[in-house]
Amino acid sequence: MSHFDEYAVGNEIQGVSDIGSVKTDLSQQGSGIGAHAAFLAEGNRLLRCQDPVLAELLDQEIADQCDRLAMVAHASLAHASVLSAAGSALGNVTVEGYAKSRYHPGSRAFDGVEELAVERAKTVFKASYANVQPHSCSSANLSVLFSLLSPGDTFLGLDLDAGGHLTHGAPASVTGRHFQALSYGLDAQGFIDYDQVAKLARKHRPKVIIAGASAYPRTIDYSRFRSVADEVGAYLLADISHIAGLVAAGLHPSPIDVAHITTTSTYKQLGGPRGGLILMGRERDTVGPDGRTKLTALMQKGVFPRSQGTPNPAAIAAKARALALVARPEFKKLAVLIVDNARSLAANLITMGHNVLTGGTDNHMVLLDLSGQNLTGVVAEQSLESCRILANRNRIPGDTKPPLVASGLRFGSNIVSQRGMGTPEMKVCADLVTSILSNVTLLDDTKYVLNPAVRSAARDAVEDLCSQYPVDVYRTLL
Ligand code: DSN
C-alpha cells in the first residue's frame, strides 16, 4: 500500500513518529487521488504536526466563518476547490511574462492554467480580451490608469465619500497624487449625478472617466457615461469589482462592450481568490493615447512589466476554478437570490425606521445613514460584531466624521445568500440589527455600551440562524 492509498481513506500514515520524516514522492499518481491532492494532504498533516499554533488559527477562521453572520458587501465565500487551487504547488512557480512568452523557464503547467483562466474569464463576461494577472482590482486599476495617463493628466472618478474607491482618485491613493483627479458625486436622492459628470467632463476634458463604486446600491448607467466620454474624447473605465457576479449573471447591465476597459476583483462577488481581472469587449482594437498602440497591447504591457512583476500562478489557477463555477447555472440562481435578499433587507430596515440611502437597492448592497440615530459607523460595526454579525462602517455623502469613525453602515447579501438564506431570513436579520442598534448607548464617537441581555439574545439568534444555514459553500457553491 502506498502513502497515497492511506491518504485516500483519510488515515494518518502508520508507524511514523518522526515529524516530517516521511519522504513522499508527490509526483506519484498511483492511488488515483492525484499529486495535487496528495501535496495538500501532506501539507495539512505537516502543518498540524509541526505548527499547531498556526493550524489552530486556521481552524479558528473556518469556525468563525461558519458561526458568524457575515452581512458584508466586500466579500464572498470561495468554494473549497478554489482555495485548494490557490494553495497549489503553482505557488512555487516564478515566471514573468505571458503564456508562450515568458522570461523564465518552468511554466509548462502554468501556461495551460493561465490560458484556461483567460478563456474562462472571456466566456463568463462575454469579453474578447482578458488579463488574469492583476494581484487585485486596485492593481488592475493602476495598470489601466498608468497605461492611459501621463503624470499630471486629468481623470474623473466617483468621490470616495460618495461611494468611490481609493484608486478612483482619492487623495490618499497614488491615483490622487500622481494625476489630476477630479470627483463627481451624487444627487440629492443619492444617485450618481450624471449631469455633474457631463459638466465636469466638458469643463476639464479628462482623459479617463471611471464608472464604478465601492459603496453604491444602484444600477450604473454605463451608456450614459460612455456618451459623456465620447463627447470629450475620454476613455471609459468601468470598475465592476463589487457587482461582477451580477454582471456575469446578467442581473446588472454589462459594461464590457460599452466601456473601453473593465476591471474587477475576483473575491468580492465571484467567490474567487484575492486577485483582479482586466477585460475588454468591442474596444479591444481601439488605439491608446499615442494613436498607434492597441488597447490590448497597452493592457498586456500595463500589467507586466509596467506595474507588476511575476504573476501569482496559484491565484490564477484559483481564478480559473472560480470562473468555472460562475459559469454554472447555479451561480445565476445565487445572483438572483443575492439581489432579492438585499432588496428585502433594505425594505425591512426601512420599515423598522432606518434611513436607507436611496430608499433601497438594485444590487447586493444596502447603505444606512446613522447620523439621525445617535450612532457612529464604528460603534454600529463593533456592537454588531460583538453579537457575531459583520457589517462595515462606511462614510456617507457629506460625512462629518473621519473615515475610522464614519456615519454610515454598509451591508451586503452575498454570503448570507451563499449560505442559502432567503427573504424570510432577511427579516430576521433586519430585526436583529434593529434590536442591537437600538439598545446601544453611545458614550462618545467610538465608545458605547450595549445592553447585555440584548447581546446575549442576539448571539443566540445568530447561532440558530447559522446552524440552520451552514456554510455549505465549501462543498456545493449554493
Ligand atoms: N474595496 C474595499 C471595500 O469595498 O470594502 C475592500 O476590498
Image (cartoon, rainbow, N blue to C red):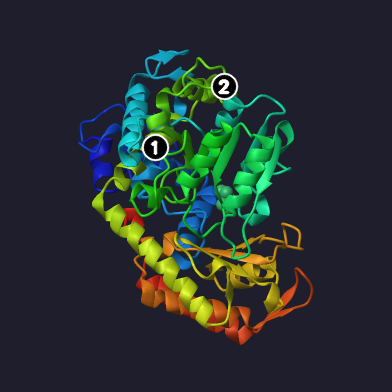
**Element type at mark 2:** loop
Q: Position of residue 48 (x, y in %)?
A: 46, 47
Q: Earlier in the sequence, mark 1 or mark 2?
A: 1
Q: Residue at x 48, y 38 (%)?
A: 263
Q: Residue at x 41, y 26 (%)?
A: 284
Tell me the residue that label 1 is attached to. 257
The answer to whether mark 2 is within 8 Å of ligand 1 is: no
Tell me the residue that label 2 is attached to. 289
Examine the rendering and report whether any part of residue 384 can be seen. Answer: yes
> Label 1 vs label 2: CA separation?
19 Å
**358 shown above or below 166:** below
Q: Nearer the viewer, residue 450 or 131?
A: 131
Please indicate whether residue 252 sits to the left or right of residue 288 in the image.
Answer: left
Report crowding for label 1: few under 14, some 14 to 19, many 20 or more residues within 10 A (C-alpha). Answer: some
The answer to whether mark 1 is within 8 Å of ligand 1 is: no
To which quarter of the image does residue 77 belong?
A: bottom left
User: Can you say which quadrant of the picture contains the N terminus?
Assistant: top left
**80 shown above or below 358:** above
Report crowding for label 2: few under 14, some 14 to 19, many 20 or more residues within 10 A (C-alpha). Answer: some
Q: Amino acid at mark 1?
A: Asp
Q: Nearer the viewer, residue 461 or 58?
A: 461
Q: Position of residue 375 (x, y in %)?
A: 70, 74
**Element type at mark 1:** loop
Q: Nearer the viewer, residue 408 or 29?
A: 408
Q: Nearer the viewer, residue 344 or 427?
A: 344
The residue lying furthest to the right in this view is 444
